[in-house]
Structures are given as C-alpha cells and as structure tokens.
Amino acid sequence: MADFFAALLDPDNTFLRLALLVSTFASISFGIIGSYVISRRISYLAGAIAHCVFGGIGAGLYLQKKVGIEWFDPMYGAIISALLAAVIIGAVSIYAGQREDTVIGALWAIGMASGLLFIDITPGYFDITSYLFGDILLISHTDLWLVICLDIVVVSLSYYFYNKLLAICFDDEFANLRGINSGLYYILLLCLTALTVVLLVRVVGIVLVIALLTIPAAVAGQFAKRLWQMMILAIIFCMLFTWSGLAVSYSLSLSSGPTIIVIAGIVYITVLIVRRIFKKA
Amino acid sequence: MTIQHDIILENVSFSYEDTPVLKDVNLAVARGDFASIVGPNGGGKTSLLKLILGSVRPDKGNVRVLGNSPEGARFNVGYMPQYVMVDLQFPVTVMDVVLMGRLGRDTGGRYSKKDRDIAKRALEEVNLSNIVNNSFSALSGGQRQRVLIARALSCEPSILLLDEPMANVDPAAEEALFGILRELNKRMTILLVTHDIGFVSQIVKSVICVNRKVVAHPTTEINGAVIKEIYGGDIRMIRHDQRCSEEGHSHG
C-alpha cells in the first residue's frame, strides 16, 4: 500500500492522481443518482443506458477517425447516445406497459452491437476492453472538469427537486394526482443517470459501471432510514470502494475497474449476510 | 332542501385497452355520504375511482367532481391507493410520506412550515403522532394504511377516496381504521373500494355495486338478490352484524 501513496506523490504519475480525483468527484453524483435508481428499482434501465453508451463511443470514433471531425471526442458520442437512450428508454418504460423488459433488453443489445459495427468500419485498432472494463490511463483533465460540472448539475437539481423526485420514486400515481408531471421528472432522472454513467465509463467501463452506480446505494440502503441519508452514505461508500480499488489494483498490478467492483461486491454481500444473521439473532 | 352531490357521473363508458370496463354509468354521490364500492375483481371498481380522480378519461359521458372537472377538483380530493402499489423497502419516514400530500400546492420544490403543520395534524387524526419519524417500512400493515390515509388527509380534501384500505389489516386494526373513517365522515364525503362485502356493515351509508354497470343502494336495501345480481352467480352470504369490541364480538 505504501507504494500506492508514494506513487500518488510522484510528479510523473499524473494519471493516478487524476484517476483518484475523478473517482472522488464522480462518487458524489454516483451516490445521489444511485440512490434514486435503487429506490425507484430501475437499475435494469440504467444498465441498458450504459450499454447504449458503447454505440455512442463507436459512432464517436467513426466520426473522428473516418469522417475526419477531429474535435469530436468519442466522449461526446457517449454523452449524446446516453441522453438519447435515456429519453427512448424513459418513453418505453412509460408507454410499453407489459412489454417493457423485452423492449429494453433489445435496446441494450442494439447499443452494444452498433458500437462494435462502428468500430469495424473505422480504420485502425482500438482496444475495446478499455471501454468495456475501464482504463485509468485514458483519464484526462477534461474528464475531471466534466465530472465537476456534472456534480454541480446533479447536486443542484436533486436538491431543488428532492421532494418531487422522492414522491415520484415512491408513488408516481399519487404524485401525478398532485399535479406533478411524473413522466417528465422520470425522464429527467434517467437523463441524470445517463450523464452519471458516462462519466465513470473511463474508470470502470461500460459493463461494470452499473455495479458502481447501484452497489454503494444498495449498501447504504441497508442502514439509511431516509433517501437523503442513503445518498450521503452511498457517496461515502462509493469513495471508499474506488479509493481502495485503485490502491489495491496499483499495488498488485491489476485492472482498476474490476478490482473496484470486486471490493464493492464483497462488501455488499458481507453486509447482507451480517444483517441477516443479526436479524435472526 | 335539495341534496348536494359531490360526485356525478352521466352516461359514462370507459374501456381499458379496447376491453370495455364500465358501460353507461350514471351515479350521484351525495355530500357527506360514506359509500362502499363493491363488486368482483376486474368489474371496474378501481376504474371508477380513477375516473373520479381524473387519472383516466371516459370514452364517453361526463364526470363532475365538486361541480368541476376531475382535474380541476384534484386538489380537493384525497386519494389512498391500493396497498400493493407502494414499495415497502423504500427509504422514507412516516413524515416524508405524509408530506407528499402537500406537493404541487406551490410551484417551489420545498415544504414550508405550514405544510409540516398540516401533515402533523393529519397524523394526529389517524392517531399516529407518536411515530412521525419512524421508518415507513418498519410499520405494521394497519399503521401503513393509516399513514397513507394521513397522506390523503394532508391534501386537505373534501372528498376522500380509498382503494381497498382494509387489505392486509388485522381485525383489531380494521376496527380502529373504521373508527377513524367514521370521524372523518363528519366533515368529508368518503368512497372506499372493497371486495369484502362484510364491510357493508354498520357505518357505511350506501353501497355502489360495480360490475360493468353501476348500481347504488342505501345500505338498508342490500339483500341476497342484489348481491347475486352484481356478482352474477350464487355466492354464499354470511350475515355479519359486525360489532367488534375488546370483549369479543357476536355474529347474530
């Protein structure tokens, strides 16, 4: 572990410091949005959004390398596709009724498949695993600023709309009767989820990001009595998971994304088992 | 003196995804009534409530609530949904839930001191002032129903609509709930959905039978023939002279 702290202070190791900063700031959005996702029980929807991001990354690479739009970072493609997916999935979830899970499962697969097809027709070699499972070497200063901006948006919107979002997640029919357009707020929530998901794709990747969104909130949910308490606890857990994951992965030369997720997963399962034992006792 | 009607349905038909649910319904609910909506599952009880709430629109006909459209009357109607519609794992306290009844009054997203006072008063009315900060998921079935009634009350309604308030409630809690509703009925019109015809007992003033068509009766008129007509088959009727007390109760 000492080598991790030494590396953090090493002026040549900017990537590690950046990874740590991005994870710390991203934890704020992850804790807040993750708590909404868990309490509204839409982690499946968030998973679909995350996988649609791959389509956007593929399209971004294609536009940048093949079409020649130099400034178009794949990140922009990811953000656009995530928002688009959020709106479509939100509409499906509101209007599709019984067939919701089938339609969302299809969107999930289409997102992944289209990403791969775009990469096929883009010249050059791309390391797909870094998008799927994360690569902290890819983190840039731009990512750090994006994460801080997102934090500001997420914190202010969830503070201002806290009561309405809470009511919609708890019982949207009742919220509707109070004159609140619950469909609109639902899609707002999915868009915030989409943006949050995109920002940690660099660190943990598309496949694993959903775990980092839901596990800290799920652990927090075991202790919290109210939604805002769940959010604060989830932020703390998310920071602890990412920090310890980065430290362990650096010390043992492992991939950082999977290390973070395995730590988070072990803590979650342990908490569930311990709580169960204590409840029985 | 003419009777004032809080809820009026005129020739209302409603279908759900091309399946006709209610047909040519005419109904008038008088102010101060305590009506129980009964009928078989899928007969249209919940649809009738939703038409009154304005969360669905009739295919034809006219719904008036407090002399207004259902949407226009929304803020004067308190609604308690079916128990199963609420997620029991949700991280909220009793106060959080009751405050939801105050939403939408002002455009802002935060609750005022006045909102909190109204929510507290609503909890007093259902005798739950002692568990304001308890976790909603840790409550008993009967307590949860009372919290949901308090949420409806914090809307400051003049009509209270309840969808199966007695589901998942033990007999003692049921008795307590009826006591609360009887008190509330002194100042507001109450409609409740139930498929337990036993409820059509002491305190209900009229019964609205729903099975595609809608027929309203004062409670005194209910007999085997009426029940058979609505449920469409032979069902066994047990007479409940329900008067439960701590000393026990007698079936007459």
Image: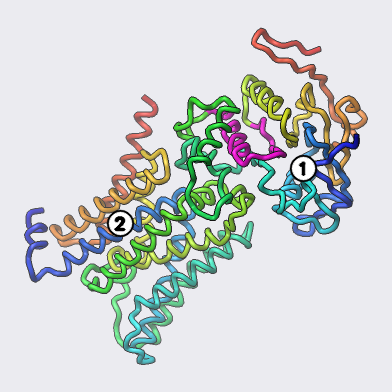
Point 35% across, 29% down: residue: A278
Q: Nearer the viewer, residue B64 or A216?
A: B64
Is the residue marked by circle 1 packed among few (<14), some (14-19), or many (20+) residues within 10 Å?
many
Mark 2 touches mark 1? (CB < 8 Å):
no
**Residue type at tag 1:** Lys
- Place of residue A32 in the rendered image (x, y in percent of width and height, measured from the top left): 38, 53
Point 43% across, 63% down: residue: A192
Is B178 contained in the magenta span? no
Q: Is A105 placed above or below B175 here?
A: below
Q: Quadrant of the C terminus of chain A?
A: top left
- Place of residue B58 in the rendered image (x, y in percent of width and height, measured from the top left): 80, 56
**Residue type at tag 2:** Ser
Q: Which residue is mark 2?
A: A27
Q: Which residues are magenta?
A: B140-167
Q: Which residue is mark 1?
A: B45
Cα separation, mark 2 vs mark 1, equals 47 Å
Is B159 contained in the magenta span? yes
Residue A133 visible? The answer is no
Chain for mark 2?
Answer: A
Point 76% across, 41% down: residue: B41
Q: Nearer the viewer, residue B42 or A178?
A: A178
Quarter where residue B176 is shown: top right
Q: Nearer the viewer, residue A95 or B178?
A: B178
Mark 2, secondary structure of its residue: helix
